Image: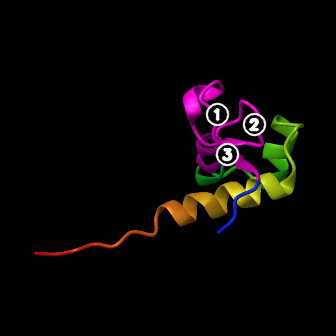
Amino acid sequence: MVFDRITFDTKIMGGRACIRGMRIPVSIIVGQIAHGATVEEILTDYPDLEAEDIRQALEYAAWLTQEEVFTA
Protein backbone atom coordinates (compact mmCIF):
# COMPACT_ATOMS: atom_id res chain seq x y z
CA MET A 1 0.00 0.00 0.00
CA VAL A 2 1.09 3.52 -0.66
CA PHE A 3 0.05 6.09 1.91
CA ASP A 4 1.14 9.34 0.33
CA ARG A 5 -0.95 11.45 2.72
CA ILE A 6 0.36 9.81 5.89
CA THR A 7 3.61 11.34 7.10
CA PHE A 8 6.04 10.70 9.93
CA ASP A 9 8.28 13.47 11.20
CA THR A 10 9.98 13.39 14.58
CA LYS A 11 9.56 17.19 14.75
CA ILE A 12 5.78 16.95 14.34
CA MET A 13 3.75 15.23 17.06
CA GLY A 14 6.79 13.20 18.11
CA GLY A 15 6.84 11.21 14.89
CA ARG A 16 3.26 9.93 15.14
CA ALA A 17 1.42 9.19 11.90
CA CYS A 18 -0.05 12.51 10.75
CA ILE A 19 -1.95 13.83 7.78
CA ARG A 20 0.26 15.53 5.17
CA GLY A 21 2.79 16.87 7.66
CA MET A 22 0.15 18.76 9.64
CA ARG A 23 -0.35 18.45 13.37
CA ILE A 24 -3.39 16.26 12.80
CA PRO A 25 -2.63 12.69 13.88
CA VAL A 26 -4.26 9.79 12.07
CA SER A 27 -5.43 8.54 15.47
CA ILE A 28 -7.58 11.67 15.95
CA ILE A 29 -9.35 11.12 12.64
CA VAL A 30 -9.89 7.41 13.22
CA GLY A 31 -11.08 8.06 16.76
CA GLN A 32 -13.62 10.61 15.62
CA ILE A 33 -15.01 8.22 13.02
CA ALA A 34 -15.17 5.47 15.65
CA HIS A 35 -17.21 7.76 17.90
CA GLY A 36 -19.73 8.52 15.18
CA ALA A 37 -18.45 11.67 13.51
CA THR A 38 -19.22 12.00 9.83
CA VAL A 39 -16.69 12.93 7.18
CA GLU A 40 -18.50 16.24 6.78
CA GLU A 41 -18.23 16.99 10.50
CA ILE A 42 -14.51 16.23 10.52
CA LEU A 43 -13.95 18.41 7.45
CA THR A 44 -15.81 21.24 9.20
CA ASP A 45 -13.74 20.82 12.37
CA TYR A 46 -10.47 20.59 10.42
CA PRO A 47 -10.81 22.85 7.36
CA ASP A 48 -7.27 22.03 6.16
CA LEU A 49 -8.26 18.38 5.65
CA GLU A 50 -9.64 16.89 2.47
CA ALA A 51 -11.98 13.91 2.16
CA GLU A 52 -9.11 11.89 0.69
CA ASP A 53 -7.09 12.50 3.89
CA ILE A 54 -9.84 10.89 5.96
CA ARG A 55 -10.19 7.96 3.56
CA GLN A 56 -6.47 7.32 3.65
CA ALA A 57 -6.36 7.60 7.46
CA LEU A 58 -8.96 4.84 7.63
CA GLU A 59 -7.08 2.74 5.08
CA TYR A 60 -3.88 3.15 7.08
CA ALA A 61 -5.64 2.10 10.30
CA ALA A 62 -7.10 -0.94 8.55
CA TRP A 63 -3.67 -1.84 7.16
CA LEU A 64 -2.18 -1.66 10.66
CA THR A 65 -4.67 -4.21 11.95
CA GLN A 66 -3.69 -6.86 9.43
CA GLU A 67 -2.02 -9.19 11.83
CA GLU A 68 -1.36 -12.86 12.04
CA VAL A 69 -2.40 -14.67 15.17
CA PHE A 70 -0.51 -17.79 16.10
CA THR A 71 -2.09 -20.11 18.65
CA ALA A 72 -0.21 -22.61 20.69
Label 1: which residue? 9
Residue 13 falls in which quadrant of the image?
Answer: top right
- How many other residues sit within 10 Å of disc 1, few (<14), some (14-19) or many (≥20)? few
For the record, the magenta segment spans: 5-31
Identify residue type, mark 1.
Asp
Q: Find out whether the residues at labels 2 and 1 contact each other: C-beta distance under 8 Å.
A: yes
Residue 10 falls in which quadrant of the image?
Answer: top right
Q: Secondary structure at mark 2?
A: loop
Disc nearer the start of the sequence (1/3): 1
The answer for how far apart the CA atoms under marks 1 and 3 are is 18 Å
Indicate left or right for 31 with 20 as reference: left
Any mark on residue 21, and which? 2
Label 3: which residue? 29
In x, y percent, where is residue 24? 71, 35
In x, y percent, where is residue 59? 65, 64
The answer for how far apart the CA atoms under marks 2 and 1 are is 7 Å
Q: Residue furthest top?
A: 11
Identify residue type, mark 2.
Gly
In x, y percent, where is residue 36? 65, 52
